[in-house]
């Protein structure tokens, strides 16, 4: 009896050791495409304990040469297609850095193989693509998360908690500004620029590229609720550069008691991602990723705080993705990265494009 107990203990310890070993191993991540300039952020941190880049799918040899020279990764990691990369490297998750139009294809390839996917914002070019992606996610039980730079801003999370705690009263107006001087003006690479200014591959110009940030944040602040209506105006101030897409967009969302103004632009004099929240009794201004100003009443003076970066693994998208794959984090339907949130984002963007093209308010069901 004693020997049996000892044997059972040894078996249990062995199983626990194997489980710990599996959980502590870096998560195997593959990269689908290199044309999205945000991939540079991942290529800079490839040497990481939480994850391992096991393969890259990219057919543009000139682009591969350029990035190998810049980031010094091995050419052995690169495969001409996503299918080939998956077959040879068996990733647990794939991060997509190709055009928004190609996000659907990435999910079509990865989902049946049980591979989780993270795409760069926005989720999809339209609701047709988004719903097809959701169907694949549901059928094959994978995670599909969308990455936004602003998800990792501690100011946005501080504002969320202030609002939830009633510090400024019920929200009445939110104004969100996102954008920069323009893709060409800030010097994005030619591979990135080519599809950013293609209405099919990007879904639009500034309205898509930066309108999605505001739609994502307000859907989060409104606990996943859709607006009652969407109205939008777009314009192209620089047709010599942006021939077939807008470079200026304003989107207005109306909720039962809240109006939201999303200003998405490729015409700002400087890069910005900031948010103003006006409640019944006070205000919160997220000036950038770390600086937040607030005023809780008309009588109170404005105060300012500088926040520390968010804790690991919530400090960047790649450690977050690894934690999701390991099961350390459950992505709830209300989360900024969630599929549920981002389906609403795409519905808002579809309505905004329709409103701008038809010159009328679009009401959501």
Image (spheres, rainbow, N blue to C red):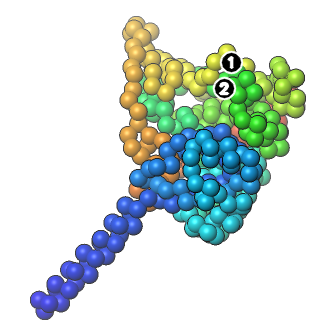
Identify the residue shown where x is 41% and y is 36%.
310
Can the viewer see residue 235?
yes
- Is residue 339 depicted above or below 296 in this figure? below
Quarter occupied by the C terminus: top right
304 and 89: which one is in front?
89
For label 1, the crowd category at 10 Å Cα-Cα, with few meaning under 14, some 14 to 19 and many 20 or more, is some
> How crowded is the residue under tag 2: few (<14 C-alpha within 10 Å), some, or many (20+)?
many
Name the residue nearer the viewer: 217 or 305. 305
Q: In this view, does 211 lie to the left or right of 43?
A: right
Residue 62 drawn above or below residue 77: above
Q: How many labels does the image show?
A: 2
Residue for badge 1:
268
Residue occupying image coordinates x 39% and y 67%: 22
Image quadrant where residue 104 sits: bottom right
Taking the image as shown, residue 328 lies to the left or right of residue 331, namely left
Secondary structure under the numbered disc 2 in the rendered image: strand
Q: Which of 270 and 140 is in front in this view?
A: 270
Query: Which numbered tag is attached to residue 179?
Result: 2
Of label 1 and label 2, which has the lower sequence position? Answer: 2
Question: Mark 1 near mark 2, Cβ–Cβ under 8 Å?
Answer: yes
- Cα distance between the residues tagged 1 and 2: 7 Å
Q: Residue 101, percent across and down?
A: 76, 48
Q: Is residue 198 left or right of residue 143?
A: right
């Amino acid at each position: 009896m004693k020997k049996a107990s000892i044997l059972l203990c040894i078996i249990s310890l062995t199983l626990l050791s194997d489980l710990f070993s599996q959980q502590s191993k870096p998560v195997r991540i593959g990269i689908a495409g290199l044309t999205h300039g945000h991939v540079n952020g991942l290529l800079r941190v490839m040497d990481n304990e939480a994850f391992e880049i096991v393969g890259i799918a990219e057919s543009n040899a000139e682009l591969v040469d350029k990035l190998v020279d810049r980031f010094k990764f091995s050419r052995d990691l690169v495969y001409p297609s996503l299918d080939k990369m998956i077959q040879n490297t068996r990733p647990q998750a794939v991060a997509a850095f190709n055009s928004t139009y190609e996000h659907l294809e990435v999910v079509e390839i990865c989902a049946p193989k049980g591979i989780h996917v993270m795409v760069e914002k926005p989720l999809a070019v339209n609701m047709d693509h988004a719903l097809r992606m959701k169907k694949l996610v549901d059928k094959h039980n994978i995670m599909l998360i969308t990455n936004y730079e602003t998800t990792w801003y501690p100011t946005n999370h501080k504002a969320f908690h202030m609002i939830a705690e009633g510090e400024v009263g019920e929200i009445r107006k939110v104004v969100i500004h996102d954008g920069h001087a323009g893709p060409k003006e800030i010097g994005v690479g030619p591979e990135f620029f080519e599809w950013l200014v293609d209405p099919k591959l990007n879904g639009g110009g500034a309205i898509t590229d930066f309108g999605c940030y505001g739609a994502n944040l307000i859907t989060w602040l409104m606990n996943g609720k859709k607006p009652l209506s969407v109205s939008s105006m777009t314009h192209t101030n620089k047709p010599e550069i942006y021939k077939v897409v807008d470079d200026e967009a304003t989107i207005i969302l109306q909720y039962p008691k809240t109006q939201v103004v999303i200003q998405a632009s490729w015409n700002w004099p400087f890069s910005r991602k900031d948010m103003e929240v006006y409640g019944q009794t006070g205000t919160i201004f997220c000036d950038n990723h770390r600086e937040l100003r607030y005023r809780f009443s008309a009588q109170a003076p404005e105060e300012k705080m500088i926040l520390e970066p968010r804790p690991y693994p919530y400090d960047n998208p790649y450690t977050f993705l690894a934690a999701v794959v390991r099961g350390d984090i459950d992505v709830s339907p209300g989360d900024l990265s969630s599929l549920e949130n981002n389906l609403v984002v795409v519905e808002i963007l579809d309505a905004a494009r329709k409103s701008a093209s038809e010159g009328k308010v679009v009401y959501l069901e």
